[in-house]
Image: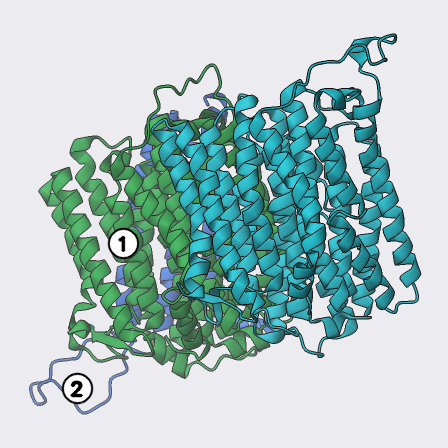
Chain colours: A blue, B green, C cyan
Amino acid sequence: MSSIQSLSGLWAYWLIIALMMVGLYIVIARDNLIKKVMGLNIFQAAAILFYVTMAKVTGGTAPIVPHDPAHPGGHGEHEILYSNPLPHVLMLTAIVVGVATTALALALAVRIHGDYGTAEEDEAVIYDMEHT
Amino acid sequence: MIEKIVVLEVVLPLLAAPVCVLVRNPRLCRLLSLGVVAICFAIAAAALLEVRGGGVISYQLGGWLPPLGIEYRVSTVNAYLLALVTAMALVVFSFDSRGGPPRVPEQRRHLYYAVFLLCISGLLGIAITGDAFNIFVFLEISSLSSYILVSLGGHRRAVLSAFYYLVMGTIGGVFFMLGVGLLYQATGTLNLRDIAARLEPSLDDRGTVLALALLVVGISIKLAVFPLHHWLPDAYSFAPPKVSAFLAATATKVSFYLLAMILFTIFGAAFVFEELRLQAVLLPLSILAMFLASGAAIFQTDLRRLLAYSSVAQIGYMTLGLSTANVTGLAGGLVHLFNHAVMKGGLFLVVACLLYRVGSVHIDALAGIGRRMPLTAAALVIGGLSLIGVPGTVGFVSKWYLVSGVLERGWTAAAVLILLSSLLALVYVGKVVEVVYFRKPAETQPIDHVREAPLGMLAPAWVLAVAAIFFGLTTNWTYGVAREAAELLLAGGI
Amino acid sequence: MSSGTTILVALLLPVLAAVSCQIFGRVGHPNLRDVATPLIGACTFAAVWRLGGDVLAGGRPELVLFEVLPGVELAFQVEPLGLVYGLVASGLWIVTSIYAVGYMRGHHEHNQTRFFTFFALSIFAALGIAFARNLFTLFLFYEALTLLTFPLVTHHGTDEARRAGRIYLGILLFTSISFLLFAILFTWRLTGTIEFTPGGILGSEPSSGMVTVLLLLYAFGAGKAALMPFHRWLPNAMVAPTPVSALLHAVAVVKAGVFAILKVVVYVFGLDLLAGSNASLALMTIASFTMLMAAVIAIRQDNLKARLAYSTISQLAYIVLGAAMATATGVLAGGLQIAMHAAGKITLFFCAGAILVATHKKKVSELDGLGRTMPWTFAAFFLASLSIIGIPPLGGSWAKWYLMVGALETGFAWQAAFLGVLMVSSLLAVFYLMPVVVRGFFASSPTAGPSGSGGGDRKPIAEAPFLCVASLVLTALLSLALFFVAGDLTSLLSF
C-alpha cells in the first residue's frame, strides 16, 4: 500500500495518532499541572476515538434491533448491517475511568497548589529545593 | 465448591470498600479489611492447593459462557499471584495502625481503608480475570487507588509524586488499552485464551506487532522497567511506609505477571523470542537496571529512596528471567516475585518501625540505632542479606535459578554480570548496616529516648524476616509453584 | 547414639554455647558464661572425636536435613579431610576460649558477651563447612562464617576496625559471590549435581581450558584461602582482639578457605582429572608466588601481628600447593598442614596476645629482652616457630616433608623449581620468625640502659594472666606432640 493510499484510506487513524501526539506533547512540554491534565485528557480521548472508529462498519446502523411484530425477537426479512456495539460499550467504561483519573488529577493539583502555593511543576521543584 | 467462591477474591474487597465509607469508624474498618483480606488469603491458598499439579478453576460471571462472557480462571500462575498479593496484604494490614498515613486525621481513616481495599481488589482482579478489557479496568482501579495512597504520605512531595505517578500510569494504561483494541481488531474477541488461539502473530502483520509494542511499553511503565522507572523512587519514598511496603510487594508483581502472560500466552514464546527477538532489548535493559539502579541506590541518603532504587534493580532481575524464555530462567523470575515481595515488604515495614520511633529514616538519623532498637535492626539486616543474595535467604534462591537459566541459554557474560551486580547490593546494604550499628549518633540528634518499636509493628516485620529465611531453605512452595507456572506459561497456557 | 545424631549434636553444641553465653551474660554471671564455653567446647570435641572413630573404621557418617532446592539438600557427611578440619576447629576452640577469658579480662575489653556468642557461632559455621556433603551446604556455611566473624573483626568499633571490617566483608563476599558461586553454578550446569563424590563429578568431558578456568574460579572464590591478590583482608583484620586473630588464622576462617579448595580438588574435580594438567600447573604457580611474596613481605613487617598474618598467607599457600598437585601425597600434605599450621600459628598468636596484655607492646622492635621477663611465652613462641618453619621434631616438619615428596611426584618438567620454592620459603620463614625469639632472649632490654647489659639487673618474671600462658604452653606442646602422632593422621588421610 503506497503512502498516499494509506494516508487517504486510513485517514481516521492518522487523525487519532496526531491527536495522541498533541496530548502527549502537552503532558511532556507544559509545566502547568492543569495543562498536563488537559493533555492527558486529549491523549485518552484519542484512544477512545480509536475504539469508536474501529467499531464503525461502513453503512452500518446503530445496533438496535427494530421491532417487528411478525417476528418477535427476530430481525425481519432483510438483513440489517449493524455497527459493532462492543467497543462502544467498552468505551463507556473507559470514559468513566478517564473521568475518575481527571478528577483525581485535579484534586491532586489542588492539594499541590495548597502545599506549594503554585500549580507550576518547575516552581514546585524549586520550592522543594529551597525548603528542605 | 472452590469454583463458586474464587470470585469472592474480587467481590469481597470491592464490596467492603463502600461499606468502609459508610461505617466511618476507623477501628471497625480496620477489622473489616483485615477480615476480608484474611478470607481472601484463605480462598487463594485453597485455590493454590486445588490447582497445583495442573488443575484449573473456572468461573463464568453471570453464567455467560466464554468467550462471550467474562471468565475468571485460576491456574497455577494466577493462584500463585493471588496467594502472594493476599498474603502480603494480610501482613501489611496486621501492621499496627499507628504506622498509617500521617496526614490523614483519625476520623477520616476509614476512607484510607476503603482505598486500600479497592487497590487490593484491582490487583486481585488483574490476576484472576481471563478477559483483556477487564484487565484494563482492574488495572485502572488498582492504579487510581495507588495514586491516592501514595499522595497520603507525610511530606508535601508525596502529592507531587502521586501526580507524576498518575501521569505516567495513565499513559501506560492508555497504551495498554490501545494494545487491547488492536488485538480485538485482529481477533474479534476479548477472552484471553480465545485471543491466544486465534492470533497468528507474524512480523509482516504490522497491527499485531504494534499491539505487542503498545502492550509491552504500557505494562513496562506500570512495572517500572528501566528506563521507564522514574515515577517509582519518588512514589515509594514519599508514600506512607505501609503503602510503600504493600505496593513494593504487590503492584509491580502483578504487572510482571501481566507482562509474562502477554508475551508467553497471547503472543507465544516462539514469536516474541525467536522471530521478534525481544530479548535483544529486554536483556540489556535488565542488566542496565541492575547496575544503574543499584548504583543510584548506593548514593541515596534516605533509606526509603535507597530501597526504592533497589526495587528498580530487582525488577531488572525479574525481566532478565523473562528474557531467558526457558523454564529455569522464567521460574527464577517468577520465584523472585515472591522472594522480592517478602524481603522488600519486610524492609519497608522496618522503615515504618524506624519512622515511628526515630521520626526520620535519613541515614544520619539512623546512626547507632542498632543498640536502641536491636530487633528492628536485626530484621533490617536479614532483609539486607536477602537483597545481597546470601545463601540461606530467599534472595539466594532467586539468584540461583536466574543464573542457572541464563547459563542454560549460554549467556555466560550475563551470568557474571548478575553476580557482580549483587555486589552493588552489598555496598548499599553494607552502608546502611554500618551506620545503624557502628556510627556514633550525632550530637544534634540524641537517640537516648528511642525505644524498640511496639510489638504490633515488630511482629509483621519479623514474620517477613523469618519468611525470608524459611523460604530460603525450603522452596517447595515457592520455586516448586513458580516452576509449574513457568512450564504452563511457556506452553502458552494460563 | 547413631552417627547421624552425633553430627547434629556436634553442630548444635556451639549454638548451645552461644545461647548460654547470651543467657549468662544477660543475667550477669560472666564467670558461669566463661566456664560454660570451654565445657561445651570439650563436649563438641568429644562428639567430633566419636565421629572420627567411625571414619577411621571406613564409615562415612551422614545426616540429611531437608531438601532446599530440587536436587539440592542441606546434608552433612563426615569424611577424612572434614574430620581433620572439624577436630582442629573444635579442639582449638576449647583452648582459645580458655585463652580468651584471660585475654579479654586482662585487657579489659568491652562487650565480652557479644564476643563469646559470635565466637561460638563461628565454630558452628566452621563445623558446618567441615561436614558439608555438597557444594551448597559448604557455600551456605562458608558465607555464614564470613558474616558471623564480622562482628568479631569490628569488635573495637573504632574507625580502623570499621575500615578493616569493610575490607574483610568486601573481599570475602566479592570473591565468594562472583567466583565461588559462579563456579558452583557452572558445575551444576555442567553435571547436574553438586554432591561431593569420591573421584569427582566433572568426568572427563570438560576441556582442559574449562577445567583450568573452573579450578581458578574455585581457588580465588575461596577468598578465605587468601591467595594473592585477594589476601588483603587478612592483615587488615589484625585490628581485632588477639583471640579473634587466633580463631581467624589458625582455627576457623582461613582454614575454611583452603579446606574448600582441598575438598573441591578431591571430590569435585577428582585427582585423576587434575593430576599433571595445565590447571594443576597454573594453580601451583599461583600458590608458589603467594608463598614467596607473602614471606618476603612478612620479613619487612614490624607489627608482630601483621608479620604473623603475612606468615599465615604464606603458609596457607602450602596447602593450596598441596591441593594443586592433585596427587595423593599432595592432598595428604595439605591435610596435615591444616592441622600442623593450626597448632603452630595459634601458639604464635597467643604469644603475641600475651605480650600485648602483659606489656602493651605490638612491635617486633620493642621486644628486646622481653624473653627474660616472659620466659614461658617466648619458649612457646620458639617451639611454634620451629614447627612453622618445618624443623623436626615438631609437627610442621611432616607437612613440609610430604609436600616436597609430592612436588617430586607431579612429574612436571618444573618439579625442581617447586622444590626450590618450598625450600626458599622455609628459609624465609626462619628470617621472619627467628628475629622475634632472638630479640626476646638475647638483645638487651632498652630500659636497662647501655651499661646494664650484663646479668646484674635480673628483672622479675612478669607473664600474662595465667589462663593465657597455660593455653599457649598447651598449644606449643601440641605442636610437639603432633610430630609423634602424625602417623594416625597420615593413615586417615590416605587417598
Residues at discs 2 and 1 both on one chain: no
**SS class, disc 2:** loop
Horizontal arrangement in the rendering, residue C230 relative to residue C106 (left or right): right
Q: Nearer the viewer, residue C128 or B50?
A: C128
Q: Is residue B380 above or below residue B130?
A: above
Q: State the residue position of label 1.
A: B120
Tally of numbered discs: 2
Please report, as a chain letter, where disc 2 is located. A
Q: Residue A6 in the image: state x and y as whole percent.
A: 54, 72
Residue at horizontal 51%, vertical 66%? B322
Q: Amino acid at mark 2?
A: His
Horizontal arrangement in the rendering, residue B28 relative to residue B292 (left or right): left
* Label placed on residue A75: 2
Q: Quadrant of the C terminus of chain B?
A: bottom left
Place residue B10 in its image quadrant. Answer: bottom left
Residue at horizontal 64%, vertical 58%? C260
